[in-house]
Each structure stands twice: as structure tokens, then as C-alpha cells.
Amino acid sequence: MSTEVRHQVSTNTDETFGAFYSSLQEYLLNASEKVNESKTLSNIGVYDDLFKFIEKAHKDPLSIISDKLNSEIKGIHLILDGMVNAFVSNHKNLYKHFTRVEHFNNALYYYIVLNENSNESKRPFLRFLFDYENKPLSDKFPIVFDFISEPIYRELVKDYEPINNGGIS
């Protein structure tokens, strides 16, 4: 590598790290201001969200971890459900009903009533699952498609509160 190229790479790296450090410094200064503000408010008996968070973390640190984990899982479910909805919207001609019914142990469950109960109709859905199962996330967040008949679907959804996928049904 020539000296000129090394100098250019070094300069670009310095600029990148410089911008990162500036952003980090600004973030920490804002955080410090919020901490000082929260401390001042608590001294006069006003307890803001930061104070309540610190108090909760002090009294029950595991609940903070649990809340964060549950929030992350909910976010992952939303992303996966959106991914499934995007896929399904391209295959509306194959099914009568497509409904997310629940999630158990991080798995997302869907009922599918096909227009025609054939291997050909199931193929795109099974291909989607096959492709998804080759992704690292699939072990922790499985997606399950249950192909069921119309009468069974009607029986199941009367007992369940179906979670429709953006109106997909």
C-alpha cells in the first residue's frame, strides 16, 4: 500500500472516530444534564422517570432486565410478523384465511386455510419456512404455519381471539 493511500485511510479513520467521539461526548453531556436535573427535582420532592427507573433498578434489578428482555422480544415479534405479512401479501391468491393466533415460547403461530389443499398451494409457504429455518433467529423465534380446513378454522377462531395480520384473513 502506498504512503499516500495509507495517509488517506488514516485520515478517513481519524475523521470517523472524531465524529463518533463528538457524538458520544454530546450524548454523555446531555445524559449528565438529565441526571443533574433529575437529582435537583428529587431534592424538592418531584420524581421524574429517571428517578423512578433508578429507584426500581435499586430495589429490583432483575425486573429491569426482564422488562428490557420482554421489550426486545416484542420488537422481534413485530419485525417477524411484518416479514410474514409481506410474504403472505404476495400469495393472497392461495388462501382464504391467514391468521396469527398466538405466540407460545417465542414462536409465532399462524392458521392458514388454503383455497385448494394441495402440495402446489402449500409449496410457497413451506419454502418460506425452509428459508427462515436456515436463519440463526429461527431457533429462538420459530414460525409455525398450520394448514387447516375451513370448518376447523371456524371452530378454532371462535374460541380464540385471532390476531389478524393487518387485515389479512
Image (cartoon, grey):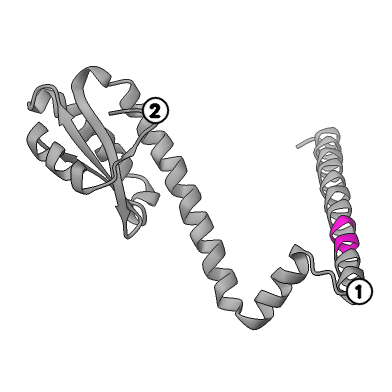
Q: Is residue 7 above or below residue 17?
A: above
**Taken as a whole, is the magenta stretch helix, strand or loop?**
helix
- State the image coordinates of residue 75 (x, y, percent, origin top left): 50, 48
Q: Which residue lies furthest to the top in this view?
A: 93
Q: In this view, does 49 lie to the left or right of 66?
A: right
- Within 10 angstroms of label 2, few (less than 14), some, or many (20 or more) residues? few
Q: Is residue 34 above or below residue 92?
A: below
Q: In this view, does 138 lie to the left or right of 48?
A: left
Quick one: quadrant of the N terminus?
A: top right
Q: Is residue 132 above or below residue 46?
A: above
Who is closer to the viewer here, 91 or 60?
Answer: 60
- State the image coordinates of residue 20 (x, y, percent, origin top left): 81, 48
- C-alpha distance separating marks 1 and 2: 52 Å
Q: Mark 2 points at which residue?
A: 86
Which quarter of the picture shows residue 56?
bottom right
The amino acid type of the residue labelled 1 equals Ile
Q: Is residue 28 left or right of residue 104?
A: right
Instruction: Tell me the tag on residue 154.
Output: none
Which range is magenta? 30-34
- State the image coordinates of residue 45 (x, y, percent, origin top left): 86, 74
Q: Is residue 90 left or right of residue 16?
A: left
The amino acid type of the residue labelled 2 equals Ala
Q: Residue furthest bottom?
A: 59
Which callout, 1 or 2, points to the residue nearer the camera?
1
SS assignment at label 2? helix
Instruction: Tell me the tag on residue 44.
Output: 1
Residue at position x 52%, y 55% in the image? 72
Quick one: quadrant of the C terminus?
A: top left
Residue at position x 88%, y 49% in the image? 22
- Within 10 angstroms of label 1, few (less than 14), some, or many (20 or more) residues? few
